Amino acid sequence: MNKKAMYPGSFDPFTNGHLDMVKKAAALFDEVYVVIGVNAKKRRSFEGERMRDAIRQTVAELGIRNVSVTVHDGLIAQYAKDNGIKYMIRGLRNNMDYNYEENMAEVNKLIDPDMEYVYFRAENVAVSSSMVKELHGYGQDVSAYVPKAVYEIL
């Protein structure tokens, strides 16, 4: 049986913390779908399609062959259901992340009750997209926090 997992997020921008989650998921699952969720009510700092291309380039350079990257503007749980994906990957930095993720899991299970959640512990809890955006906005070097292909579009 082909085990498919999805790692959704805004990835605005995609960080090395996100990349760690992708690597962990790719080691456990046959197929991993990195899905850049687009929320029409939120303004992105970095264009979703450019971020998709940078993530694709990053995983290709690392030789990770079982990861695909796409941009999606609908419900994440519906995307998973429509594509036969039964596992949702989430990264946890702290107990606040856990509480937030459990609330989202309950909502998503209304759409797909068979969805299973797999939580990975974040290795570098200080790294977040918000932190990268803020540091970058103040002219700080953020190259240590994002993959090279992502840094090139910041």
Image (spheres, helix red, strand yellow):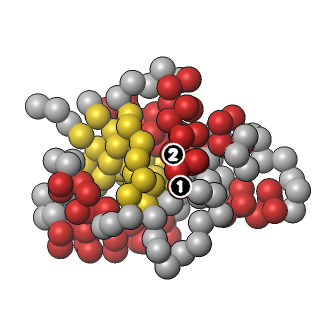
Alpha carbon distance from label 1 to label 2? 6 Å
Q: Which picture quadrant has residue 36?
A: bottom left
Mark 1 = which residue? Answer: 48
Residue 70 horizontal/vertical position (percent): 40, 47
Q: Which mark is residue 52?
A: 2
Q: Is residue 31 left or right of residue 25?
A: left
Give 66 or 40, whichever is nearer the viewer.
Answer: 40
Point out the residue furthest to the top here. 63
Point out the residue furthest to the right here. 139
Whether residue 54 is visible: yes
Asked if the residues shown at circle 1 and circle 2 are in contact, with their CB atoms under 8 angstroms apart, the answer is: yes
Q: In this view, does 90 lie to the left or right of 128?
A: left
Q: Could you tell me which residue is drawn at 81 percent across and 62 percent down? A: 137
Q: Could you tell me which residue is drawn at 50 percent across and 26 percent down? A: 60
- Label 2, secondary structure: give it: helix
Whether residue 102 is visible: no
Q: Could you tell me which residue is drawn at 20 percent across and 49 percent down? A: 83
Q: In which quarter of the image is the N terminus?
A: top left
Residue 99 horizontal/vertical position (percent): 41, 71
- Label 1, secondary structure: give it: helix
Q: What residue type is labelled 2?
A: Arg
Residue 78 horizontal/vertical position (percent): 23, 63
Q: Could you tell me which residue is drawn at 65 percent across and 63 percent down? A: 45
